Image (cartoon, rainbow, N blue to C red):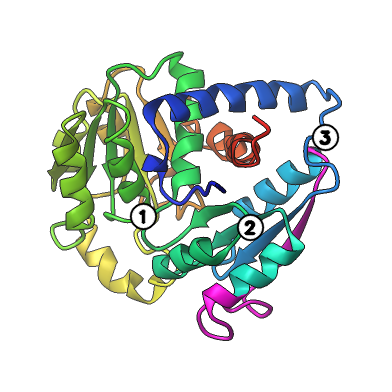
Amino acid sequence: MKKDFLHIDDWSTDEILGVLDLATAVKTKLKSREPFAPFKDRTLAMVFAKPSARTRVSFETGFSRMGGHAVYLGPSEVDVGNREPAKDVARVLSGYNDMIMARLFDHAHLLELAQFATVPVINGLTDYNHPCQIMADLLTIKEHRRHLDQIKITYVGDGNNIVHSWLRLATRLPLHFVCACPLNYPPDRSTLELARQGGLSKVDISHDPLAAAKDADVIYTDVWASMGKKHELAERKRHFMGFTVTPEIMAAAKPDALFMHCLPAQRGLEVVDEVIESPASIVFPQAENRMHMQNAIMLKLAGLG
């Protein structure tokens, strides 16, 4: 049976840890310029409803460096769910390619794409979740802390797709996750309950970023208005006052706390320059690790890892 990667909890705890180790090994190979072409004569279709510099470059570069060829399909070429049903796109692309990565707005379109595709489908992001990002985050945290034990992640901002992926991860790895969000911008209720009912992790919702940051190992943030919601930014600025990651919030965390952001950052809104440019910031190693982690994910789905 083909395997897809649509949600971070599609994989067991052991599978997640195994892919982390695989990403480290593949990263070492690429950094040392070892000959490594497991995807020779294979193609990856990259379907973008939402544009992204990091997602396109990381997938295209990673697949290419592993010997394959990636094909970019933008919104004007494949408007999934509008110009063409997802189930039709899935079957057409499956006939041409060995794997599909899709970065879409509607999560239902991704699920339909995976249902009808006969090749592995990877979630490059939807409005609901972003599993590749959180897998890359785990790799980055492990590299800087040397372990993932007893980790407290405090996320400051909108209860968005990043939060949903952390909540689903909380059913696989034991952690303490706190989402510090404005009152009217919480994460999806059913996903929050899924994480809490899993019984593996401690999960909290807070509306006080400073209190939520206490003893955190990682302070994480994202833009206040994601793609597709930029028209709400002026209104959101009113509600998100006090949710900017500042040196004061970092000082409330552990002395060796790390700062993370999935980028792009709107400096001066969700984070100030003093934080994102500080020694605590690991946002650029985090961005690089998108490629290394996605390489490992693709290898696993192809049965090559």
Residue type at mark 3 is Ala
Seen at 19% across and 27% down, the residue is 214
Q: Which mark is residue 37?
A: 3
Circle count: 3
Q: What kind of element bears circle 3?
A: loop
Up-down: is 21 above or below 136?
A: above
What amino acid does circle 1 point to? Asn
Find residue 265 and report its horizontal and vertical position in percent: 47, 51
Give the side of residue 3 with respect to residue 166, left or right: right
Disc 2: CA contacts within 10 A as few (<14), some (14-19) or many (>=20): many
**Residue 242 visible within the image:** no
Indicate the secondary structure of the residue bearing disc 1. helix
Q: Earlier in the sequence, mark 3 or mark 1?
A: 3
- Looking at the rendered image, the quarter that the C terminus falls into is top right
Q: Residue at x 32, y 72 (%)?
A: 234
Determine whether the residue tagged by mark 2 lies in a helix, strand or loop. strand
The disc, 3 or 2, on the residue closer to the chain's N-terminal end is 3
- Identify the magenta region: 66-88
Image vertical order of residue 223 relative to residue 76, above or below: above
Q: Which of the numbered marks, if any, corresponds to residue 161? A: 1
Q: Residue extending furthest bottom?
A: 83
**Up/down of 133 relative to 98, above or below:** above
- Rendering quarter of residue 204: top left
Sequence-wise, the earlier of marks 1 and 2 is: 2
Verify whether residue 67 appears in magenta: yes
Distance (Cα) linking label 3 and label 2 = 19 Å
Q: Is residue 259 left or right of residue 163?
A: right
Find disc 2 in the rendering and name its residue.
Answer: 100
Q: Which residue type does callout 2 highlight?
A: Ile
Q: Position of residue 222 (x, y in %)?
A: 39, 50
Residue 35's x, y, as percent?
86, 26
